[in-house]
């Protein structure tokens, strides 16, 4: 009865879905056409059984998180993405912010006595935030706190600042590496289909340019993540095409760590007329991501966007990572109407969230080295009273 194929057969699925399940469980690659079939025909129960089995084979009950915080230098942006509730146009700065280098470093220093392992830096695109600005910023962060992992900027930002500096992607990424950049987040991917991309994110780097910047970064020996914005005007075929392009680049470089589906939220943007997809569709999307993305180690549910309840559910649908503590330092998704309007969880709260659904909480660093295994962890009195450094194990 524990055999997943027996469970799937008891669901009475058609021959096509049964054949896809057989392939996935035998570690055979799912085709683009089969990926679309999963979206069009597969029920949540079928997808949950299959994705959870793949997750268990890779990670067992292990569920990862880290202690991180975000710095968003500005929400003023040259681009006018129709799905974005975060950015403000240059001429409409009334409710925007533009941090100086000193102000950003003050935010970094405010975490000096906290056991965070990562700072995540992304924001709007403005001429003042150029190659020299970020090179200087990264160097100063490293000089101040060498062990703090800098995960910063998307290809959208890099494309603009390298073009402005009249340097190639290769030269630009080498400069960022020299300055102290450790890894890249996965943002700015949106949907790779160029027609859809032009409609929702016109003017930004193209799909090929996004992939090229990650390719160069990977070939420098570094790691990055990848995202997909879903639940707007794209079709199922667009989602599968997007994942296939990521899967192909991963075959080439092996540099991606994590695939992160990001849900479109419709508050206060030019696409507010587009109805958001349901929680059921969120879970189906995570599960299909786990089934289709066979060469990605991790599937992440970004809990500040979908809420902690859905994030918990996703752990039964192929997800093995729910991001980090965040510490209420991001406005990108709260301004779009995300479930979590004050996105902050203590380490103990994150551990509890994972344990409540029978999974094993593992604190990781950005590169998935284990910092602390919390399975069966006994909290000390001081730990119960506050957010303090914990012993680390490798």
Image (tube, rainbow, N blue to C red):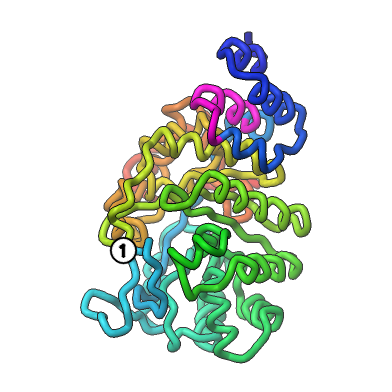
Work out whether residue 237 or residue 145 is closer to the camera in this orientation and state it.
237
Residue bearing mark 1: 270
Residue 265 falls inside the magenta stretch: no
The residue under the point 58% across, 41% down is: 289
Task: Report whether 79 appears left or right of 236.
Answer: left
294 relative to 163, above or below: above
The residue under the point 54% across, 61% down is: 189
Identify the image quadrant of residue 246. Answer: bottom right
Q: Residue furthest bottom?
A: 166
Q: Residue furthest left?
A: 94
173 relative to 82, above or below: below
**How many marks can you see?**
1
Q: Residue furthest front?
A: 195
Please identify the quadrant where the N terminus is shown: top right
Give the image location of residue 75, x and y in percent: 35, 73
Give the image location of residue 202, x and y in percent: 46, 71
Magenta: main secondary structure: helix
The residue under the point 35% across, 80% down is: 99
Task: Report whether 43 appears left or right of 51.
Answer: left
Give the image location of residue 285, x and y in percent: 51, 39
Give the image location of residue 376, x and y in percent: 51, 29
Task: Report whether 379 appears left or right of 187.
Answer: left
Please tell me whether mark 1 sits on a helix, a strand or a loop.
loop
Work out whether residue 343 or residue 17 is closer to the camera in this orientation and state it.
17
Q: Dot 1: few (<14), some (14–19), or many (≥20) neighbours within 10 Å? A: some
Visible residue check, residue 214 = yes
Which span of residues is magenta-colored? 39-55
Task: Report whether 375 appears left or right of 275.
Answer: right
Visible residue check, residue 351 = no
The residue under the point 62% across, 60% down is: 224
Residue 50 falls inside the magenta stretch: yes
């Amino acid at each position: 009865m524990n055999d997943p194929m027996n469970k799937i057969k008891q669901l009475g699925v058609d021959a096509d879905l049964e054949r896809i399940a057989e392939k996935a469980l035998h570690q055979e690659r799912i085709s683009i056409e089969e990926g679309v079939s999963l979206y069009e025909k597969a029920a949540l129960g079928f997808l949950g059984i299959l994705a959870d089995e793949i997750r268990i084979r890779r990670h067992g009950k292990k569920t990862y998180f880290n202690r991180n915080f975000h710095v968003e230098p500005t929400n003023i942006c040259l681009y006018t993405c129709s799905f974005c509730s975060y950015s403000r146009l240059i001429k409409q700065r009334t409710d925007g912010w533009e941090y100086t280098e000193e102000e950003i470093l003050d935010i970094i220093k405010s975490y000096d006595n906290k056991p965070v392992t990562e700072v995540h830096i992304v924001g709007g695109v403005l001429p003042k935030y150029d190659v020299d600005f970020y090179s200087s910023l990264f160097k100063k962060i490293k000089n101040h706190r060498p062990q703090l992992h800098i995960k910063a900027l998307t290809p959208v930002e890099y494309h603009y600042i390298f073009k402005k500096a009249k340097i190639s992607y290769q030269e630009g990424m080498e400069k960022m590496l020299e300055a102290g950049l450790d890894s890249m987040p996965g943002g700015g991917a949106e949907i790779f289909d160029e027609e859809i991309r032009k409609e929702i994110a016109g003017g930004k780097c193209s799909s090929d340019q996004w992939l090229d910047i990650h390719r160069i970064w990977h070939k420098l020996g570094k790691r990055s993540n990848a995202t997909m914005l879903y639940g707007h005007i794209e079709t199922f075929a667009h989602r599968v095409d997007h994942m296939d392009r990521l899967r192909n680049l991963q075959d080439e470089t092996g540099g991606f760590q994590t695939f992160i589906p990001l849900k479109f939220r419709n508050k206060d943007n030019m696409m507010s007329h587009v109805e958001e997809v349901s929680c059921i569709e969120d879970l189906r999307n995570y599960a299909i991501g786990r089934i289709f993305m066979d060469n990605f180690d991790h599937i992440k549910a970004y809990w500040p966007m979908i809420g902690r309840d859905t994030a918990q559910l996703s752990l039964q649908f192929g997800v093995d990572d729910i991001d980090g503590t965040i510490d209420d330092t991001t406005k990108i998704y709260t301004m779009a109407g995300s479930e979590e309007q004050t996105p902050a969880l203590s380490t103990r709260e994150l551990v509890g969230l994972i344990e409540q659904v029978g999974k094993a909480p593992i604190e990781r660093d950005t590169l998935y080295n284990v910092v602390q295994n919390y399975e069966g962890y006994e909290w000390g009195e001081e730990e119960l009273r506050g957010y303090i450094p914990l012993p680390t194990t490798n």
